[in-house]
Image (tube, rainbow, N blue to C red):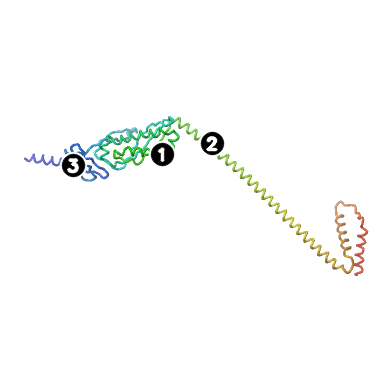
Amino acid sequence: MFTLSIILIVLALVFVAKGVIIVQQAEVVIVERLGKFDRVLQSGFNFIIPVIEAPRAIDWKVTQKGFDGTTYSIIQKRTKIDLREAVYDFPRQNVITKDNVSISINALLYFQIVDPKSAVYEIQNLPDAIEKLTQTNLRNLVGQMDLDESLVSRDKINHELRARLDEATNKWGVKVNRVELQDIMPPTDIQSAMEKQMKAERDRRAAILEAEGLKKSAVLKAEGEKEAAINRAEGEKQANILRAEGVAQARILEADGEKEAIQRIIGALADKGQPDKYLIAMKYLETMKTITSGKDNKIVYMPYEATGILSSVDGIKQMFDSNK
């Protein structure tokens, strides 16, 4: 009797242990009753009826790296479904472009399970199905572009691929949030040709920039010389104007002084003689001084009407003698 009690207690403990399920945060468990969907267990403490009820196990493809660095995939059985956003790193694959160039592409996919029931019952292996779907749509998108367009259209490929995957995986209870292309690697010979093309393009742009620089430099130099010549001409013009104005003012002042002197002489000699003869004689003497002041002048001659001038000088002498 005592042994039977112990057996019953052990069976009860095993029954309870089998019926208790603790679900972690951001995880759920699909429970089936007699092989049919019954409910979804949320995070926390949950209890099921052993034998009659059981968690539904699902196949989940997992990518791992070995000790030698190689990447391989394994299939695991899981009873808990993670509701957090997951990232899936797809292995590198070859894709042919529109111009028949084979390129290697490595992609990342970010997705999240929003309907656990659909993720379990609508698809057999969710990660594997998403991977195959991504590869197929990626080949279709890149196959519509040539090599140059595919290399510069990552954002376009990411956007269109995400839209297609999100629409296709909607019935699986999955939301595709983002798709990222990590690397796009053309063949080695294509890379070499592209590098040569880029180098030639850079050399061409450098030559164009150098020619434009020389052109601008020559234009600026010519404009500078033009401005300098204009400034020099303007300066010489202003200098000539100022010199002419100075000479004119000097002549005016000289004429005013001579006028003042003549007026004074005329005023002083008005009642004592003939001032016109005096002025003519003075001018004659100044002219004679200028003629004979040359260094090589050896001949002194008298003009034709010198006698008249001398008579004027003699008249001046007599005028001063009478004054005395």
- Per the model, the C-alpha gap separating discs 1 and 3 is 49 Å
Picture quadrant where residue 171 is located: top left
The numbered mark, 3 or 2, whose residue comes first in the sequence reads: 3
What numbered label is drawn on residue 48? 3
> In front of the other: label 1 or label 3?
1
Picture quadrant where residue 180 is located: top left
Question: Residue at the spot x=76%, y=58% of the render?
Answer: 248
State yes or no: discs 1 and 2 in contact (Cβ < 8 Å): no
Whole-percent x, y for residue 300 in the image = 90, 54
Whole-percent x, y for residue 28 in the image = 25, 42
Judged from the image, the secondary structure of the residue bearing numbered disc 2 is helix
The numbered mark, 1 or 3, whose residue comes first in the sequence reads: 3
- Per the model, the C-alpha gap separating discs 1 and 2 is 30 Å
Picture quadrant where residue 304 is located: bottom right
What numbered label is drawn on residue 156? 1
What numbered label is drawn on residue 204? 2
Q: Taking 94 as reference, is 207 left or right?
A: right
> In front of the other: label 1 or label 2?
1
Question: Residue at the spot x=50%, y=33% of the render?
Answer: 197
Whole-percent x, y for residue 285 in the image = 87, 59
Amino acid at circle 1 = Lys
